[in-house]
Image (spheres, rainbow, N blue to C red):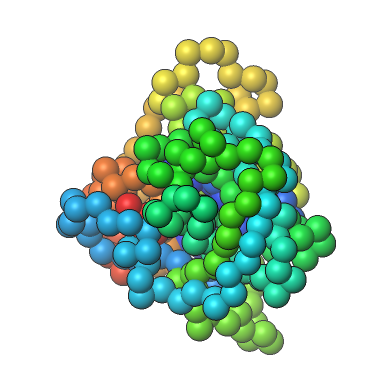
Amino acid sequence: MAHATVYVGFTVPQLLRGASRIFPTHPALVVLRHSAFCYCTTNGTIKSKRKMDHLERTANNFRQEVISQAKVCGITNESETVKRLRLAIANKDFTFKAGQWVDFFIPGVSVVGGFSICSSPGLLEQEGILELAVKHTVHPPAHWIHTECTLDSEVALRVGADLHGYQEGKGNGYKMGTVKLYYSAKNTSELLFKKNILGLMNAFPGKITCRFHVTQQSSQICKELQPHVTEGRISEKDLEKHVSNDTLWYICGPPPMIESISKLLSNIGVPRNCVFFEKWW
């Protein structure tokens, strides 16, 4: 049976990764999509305020044994705060599935990074390329990417995922559900991969839709985006229209945002076991 899932968060590659098998190609977002993709998330309430590093947060998650050398072959400014890193993978045995991240090892930097993959497995298979979208922070790996990383810089990668053990059923009557994405950012320049998302909407009308929210827009919004943009934060009213027994809710973003949206969902009667969020804090 097809049913819907709702995502709330501040990263867009999750949607692109989930759709990569049907449309090759990371702000708050809410997405409705089929339950077969309900992996790499954890439900519950955030309680600890102590900061943990990436390896500590994900210590119990499955990792591939393969650690591959990689060389930076492209750096693009996706916005004022986000760089897209294009990496040529040396090891032919390196593989990943949609929804996975990489442990990111940098020579001379003792802290290991953890970044979600924003390209499709098809790009790796066809060109040996993997892409990451990294927001600037003071965290050493992200800081290195934004201040020291250059073309031909060498790093190492290892794939990790919460989806270990997950297998997509075949011949079980699977039917594609629907995706509703609420994607919020400060302004339209911070809406990363917006053209890709519009492309997905056009490719799958009625199945994938998106509402962009901007909270501090000062310039005029381009005509292409205008029909899809709402000024202001994602509200309880936006969410309640999607409540049903067949809806799963995925949240992605910083802890205050996750806590806020989780509270809104509780207020409108969404069961706690239907709410999921990634462990990236």
Q: Determine if residue 274 is in view.
A: no
The answer to which of 91 and 198 lies nearer the viewer is 91
Residue 79 picture quarter: top right
Question: Looking at the figure, which quarter contains the N terminus?
Answer: bottom right
The relative height of residue 83 versus residue 86 in the rendered view (above or below) is above
Residue 126 percent coordinates (x, y): 82, 62
Residue 176 picture quarter: bottom right
Residue 172 percent coordinates (x, y): 63, 86
The relative height of residue 273 versus residue 16 in the rendered view (above or below) is below
Residue situated furthest top in the rendering: 219
Residue 135 as seen in the image, left or right of residue 235: right
Q: Residue at x 54, y 36 (%)?
A: 148
Residue 98 percent coordinates (x, y): 61, 64
Residue 56 as seen in the image, left or right of residue 181: left
Q: Residue at x 30, y 59 (%)?
A: 270
The answer to which of 277 and 105 lies nearer the viewer is 105
Q: Residue at x 26, y 43 (%)?
A: 256
Residue 122 percent coordinates (x, y): 75, 62
The relative height of residue 248 versus residue 9 in the rendered view (above or below) is below
The answer to which of 215 and 159 lies nearer the viewer is 159
Residue 216 as seen in the image, left or right of residue 267: right
The answer to which of 62 and 195 lies nearer the viewer is 62
The relative height of residue 232 versus residue 274 in the rendered view (above or below) is above
